[in-house]
Amino acid sequence: MYAQRRKWSAEEEEALLAGICKYGPGKWSYIINDPEFRAQLSNRTNIDLKDKWRNMTIKEEAKTLVNKI
């Protein structure tokens, strides 16, 4: 069936952000295959990275909107 969802660790989030800084959003396979990030993201897929980035971005936009109110 489906794999059980795992909570993202701080190390995984940092590796994702560093990978996005290096390659840009949307370059998920580059990030996963980069030796610098491979160990931290070994249990994640391209889709996991895409979804996490989208959720992190939405969360940040929500904080910005709340601060404007």
Image (cartoon, grey):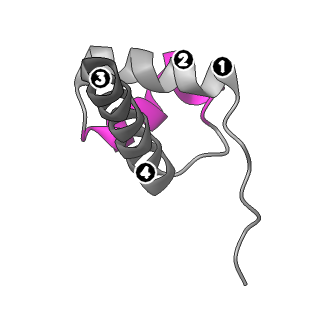
Q: Residues within 10 Å of mark 1 (few under 14, many from 20)?
A: few
From the viewer's perspective, is the residue at label 3 or at label 4 nearer? Answer: 3
The tag earlier along the polypeptide, 1 or 3, is 1
Q: Quadrant of residue 49?
A: top left
Which residue type does callout 4 highlight? Asp
Identify the mark nearer the N-term, 3 or 2.
2
Image height check: is 56 above or below 47? above
The secondary element bearing badge 1 is classed as helix
- Residue 21's tag is none
Q: Nearer the viewer, residue 15 or 57?
A: 57
Residue sitting farthest toward the bottom: 1
Q: Are marks 2 and 1 in contact (CB under 8 Å)?
A: yes
Q: Amino acid at mark 3?
A: Thr
Which comes sooner in the sequence, label 4 or label 1?
A: 1
Answer whether residue 66 is magenta in the image: no
> Is 48 positioned to the left or the right of 58 in the image?
right
Residue behind mark 1? 11
Q: Residue extending furthest front?
A: 69
Q: Which mark is residue 14?
A: 2
> Image point 77% across, 64% down: which residue?
4
Residue type of the residue flagged with mark 1: Glu
Secondary structure state at the residue bearing disc 3: helix
Residue visible at 38% across and 26% down in the picture: 63
Q: Amino acid at mark 2?
A: Glu
Mark 4 → mark 1, Cα distance in angstroms: 17 Å
| Dot label at residue 51 | 4
Which x, y percent locates residue 19?
39, 22
- The alpha-carbon separation of the residues under discs 4 and 2 comes to 15 Å
Residue 2 placement: quadrant: bottom right
Tell me: residue 12, above or below residue 32.
above
Real-space Cα separation, disc 1 to disc 3, in angstroms: 24 Å
The residue located at (29%, 23%) in the rendering is 64
